[in-house]
Image: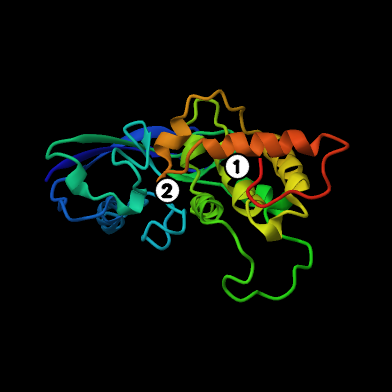
Amino acid sequence: MRITLHIWRQKGPHDAGRLVTYEVPDASPEMSFLEMLDVLNERLTAKGEEPVAFDHDCREGICGTCGVVINGIPHGPRAATTTCQLHMRSFRDGDHLTCEPWRARAFPVIRDLAVDRSAFDRIVEAGGFIGVNTGSAPDGNSIPIPKKTADLSMDAAACIGCGACVAACPNASAMLFVAAKISHLGLLPQGQPERFDRAAKMVARMDGEGFGNCTNTRECEAACPKEIGVEFIARMNRDFLRAGVADRPEKATAGGA
């Protein structure tokens, strides 16, 4: 299949970028999107041209490293699919594909399709962990946790931090990412001692990084390759509000409001 690519090329964060057109005349439908970019880069290198820079690592839809906006959609047209797991059979012979990096002030372009997502790391460093001494790892099922609560926590923990939610949001909001990181700990007993402080610290860090506000367009939910729902944003908002109440309860039950 013949694919025409219009790829964003930018030498650095302070350079002007532009779309450059490339032809891939023999893409296989069984290739992943990143494998197709590999083929393009091999040909560019053979001709003495600069290859296209893009993020990738595990290529198994797990690490969250990859991320390309394809025809205006983060990760491309298939729902619940990362760029590395998107296969060329999702497109048609003769298609024109516009490939751009994540677009957000908090994600400055490093080069071409690669962006700096270290803002996410700093948000996690602000409170996305359990800092109190909870002892060694307990045996399985030694702490009873309702299945509904455990399932919710696992749903939130599925976030891979790819940043598609930010790229899809018209406000470049990171609320879904932060909500997932807050919720997967805040739902479990081990996360209760720091639950409200965690929400306050991580939200403050998110705002400090320059991400936008949530206006409930739900584009983040639609773009998330792990299908994380916006109900976690509501949970985060509740914890954030309770963090600001001076006489909040000293303890909270696992999975509470």
Residue 33 visible, this orientation:
yes
Q: Look at the image and tell me whether residue 13 can be seen.
A: no
Neighbor class of circle 2 (other Cα within 10 Å; few <14, some 14-19, many 20+) is many
Within-10-Å neighbours for mark 1: few <14, some 14–19, many 20+: many
Callout 2 secondary element = loop
Q: Where, by quadrant of the figure, is residue 75 drawn?
A: top left
Q: Position of residue 246 (x, y in %)?
A: 88, 36
Q: Where in the figure is residue 59, as x and y percent of width and height?
A: 36, 60
Q: Depth check: 51 or 91 in front? A: 91
Colour treatment of the image: rainbow
Residue farthest along the right direction in this orientation: 246
* Chain-order first, disc 2 or disc 1: 1
Q: Which residue is mark 2?
A: 226
Residue on which disc 1 sits: 179
Q: Nearer the viewer, residue 150 or 106?
A: 150
**What's the amino acid at mark 2?**
Lys
Kindly identify the residue that appears in the image at 32 percent across and 41 percent down.
Answer: 79
Image quarter for residue 243?
top right
Instruction: Name the residue: 29% across, 56% down.
Output: 38
x and y percentages locating residue 211 in the rendered image: 62, 33
Q: Residue at x 39, y 43 (%)?
A: 68
Residue type for callout 1: Ala
Above or below, 93 relative to 31: above
From the viewer's side, name the closer residue of 255 and 231.
255
Position in image of residue 53 (x %, y %): 41, 50
Quadrant where the C terminus lies?
A: top right
**Where 147 sits versus 143, above or below?**
above
Callout 2–callout 1 Cβ contact below 8 Å: no
Element carrying mark 1: helix
Towards the viewer: 90 or 15: 90
